[in-house]
Amino acid sequence: MTFHIGAKPGEIAETVLLPGDPYRARWAAQTYLEDAVLVNETRGMLGYTGTYKGHRVTIHGSGMGMPSLSIYANELIRDYGAQTLIRIGSAGALQQHVKVRDVVLAQTASTNGSPSQSIFKELNFAPCADFGLLCAAHIAAQKIGVPVHVGGIYSSDTFYDERPDLSEQLQRHGTLCVEMEAAELYHLAARYGRRALAVLTISDHILTHEALPADQRERSFGAMVEVALEAAFA
């Protein structure tokens, strides 16, 4: 057990999917895993371990924002031996050709501030995804026929953004979408020598203001979960 995860030794799999929302973790585990068992509910952050096509998988909530994800990812890696960590979550599109319900695979994740940035001081370290996971996820997305985009994303701890100038520069430089956790996950994976990837569903569009209704989000997020699971065990 750790400060934030109440699982016993051996209850967390080496492969962990990380949705931000604990209820999304429960939905994904109940929908895609066999024999899913609740292994953590400390502070209401739910984690389940089961199997996918015979492979052990944990699906564990990470909370909202990079500071929260950093806590859970650190403990999963250092105390429970997680080797492969895949963020599954929603994102806002920043490019016209990226549509609501599309899947984005984050090749790189830019940020203007994460818990790891202070380590590098003046260096602007560029964290990136594991190439094997990225390739496998792209193949998986093509197989199930979901529209998929690969490229750079932006991770922000500010949900209600008041920097339209920054958004304009991100769009100008081809950034596909904005979300709130991937950059810190990629930093930690690099630090500890783990595999990481962010598989994201576009839930809203920054330019067109289109958004998925709440009652359609879970159905639309299914492809993202399937892509992540297939990539983990390719």
Image (cartoon, rainbow, N blue to C red):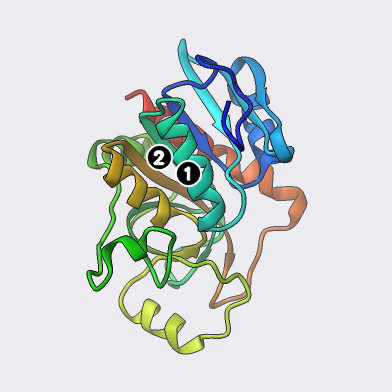
Q: Relative to 160, is 151 on the left or the right? A: left
Residue shown at the point (51%, 61%) measured from the top left: 179
Q: Give me the C-alpha separation between circle 2 and circle 1.
A: 16 Å
Mark 1 crowd level (few <14, some 14–19, many ≥20, 10 Å Cα): many
Q: Is residue 10 above or below residue 159?
A: above
Q: Residue 133 at what x, y percent from top left?
A: 31, 37
Q: Residue 140 at what x, y percent from top left?
A: 37, 34
Q: Amino acid at mark 1?
A: Arg
Residue shown at the point (36%, 47%) measured from the top left: 188
| Residue picked out by circle 2 | 141
Q: How many marks?
A: 2
As helix, strand or loop, the secondary structure at mark 1 comes to: strand
Q: Which mark is residue 40?
A: none
Near-viewer residue (147 or 201) = 201
As helix, strand or loop, the secondary structure at mark 2 comes to: helix
Quarter of the figure with residue 124: bottom left
| Residue picked out by circle 1 | 87
Q: Amino acid at mark 2?
A: Ala
Q: Are marks 2 and 1 in contact (CB under 8 Å)?
A: no
Quarter of the figure with residue 82: top left
Near-viewer residue (137 or 76) = 76
Mark with earlier residue (2, 1): 1
Q: Residue 79 at what x, y percent from top left?
A: 45, 28
Residue shown at the point (24%, 73%) measured from the top left: 122
Q: Residue 59 at what x, y percent from top left?
A: 56, 30
Q: Is residue 170 above or below residue 201?
A: below
- Of badges 2 and 1, nearer the viewer stands 1
Residue shown at the point (28%, 45%) measured from the top left: 191
Near-viewer residue (120 or 232) = 120
Q: Relative to 222, is 13 on the left or the right? A: left
Quarter of the rendering occupied by the N terminus? top right
